[in-house]
Image (cartoon, rainbow, N blue to C red):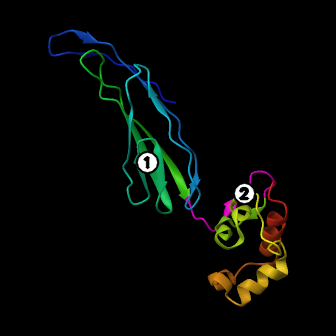
Amino acid sequence: AVTQTFTVASATGLVLPAQTISFVSPGAQTVGVTPPSLSASASSGLLVTLTSSTAAVCTVSGNALTLLAVGNCTVTAQQAGNANIAAAPNVARTFAVNNPAVVNSAVNGKTLYASCSGCHGAAAGGGLNVLAGANSPAVIQGAINTNLGRMGMLSNLTRQNLADIAAYLATPTI
């Protein structure tokens, strides 16, 4: 969090108390995966407004972040102050919005393909439900070969990629 302090004189010449904004970046996100709610607060207790300056990549409504495209998302926290408190300096956070095709697993270093959840259920996107047979490299390769569910676009996956996907689907709690 960034803390900045400054003093502002009001129109009547009175010095208004300063305030700061605390706003932690949500970190890298992935298109198609529900992002966390954003959280920002002002030391004054006044309401903080969040806005996106990269509307083609992400939008913000209240505390809800919506990811639209791959790229860098910049969200700015603002608090304009009032008759008794000076405006806070804006705090901007920029973070990556990644391609949904490949997500790195911090748990074991494998590469997982989160976009498979559309066909294979929630487990392929990090949930717990796995469709019967979806945890076999042969089944996955067969679906790709027959272009089942438009999987033909994945024809460039290696045997190791298929094994990683199958292993993940077989053990969704890793």
In this view, 111 is above or below 152:
above
In magenta stretch: residue 108 = yes
- The residue under the point 49% across, 59% down is 71
Read off the residue under disc 2: 127
For label 2, count other residues whose C-alpha is less than 10 Å away and answer few (under 14), some (14-19) or many (20+).
few
For residue 9, what is the image quadrant? top left
- The residue under the point 47% across, 54% down is 66
- The residue under the point 30% across, 16% down is 7
Q: Residue furthest top?
A: 14
Can you say which quadrant of the picture contains the C terminus? bottom right
Looking at the rendered structure, the number of numbered marks drawn on it comes to 2
Mark 2 vs mark 1: in front:
2
48 or 1: nearer the eye?
A: 48
For residue 36, what is the image quadrant? top right
Q: Secondary structure at mark 1?
A: strand
Tag 2: residue type?
Gly
Read off the residue under disc 1: 74
- The residue under the point 67% across, 73% down is 119
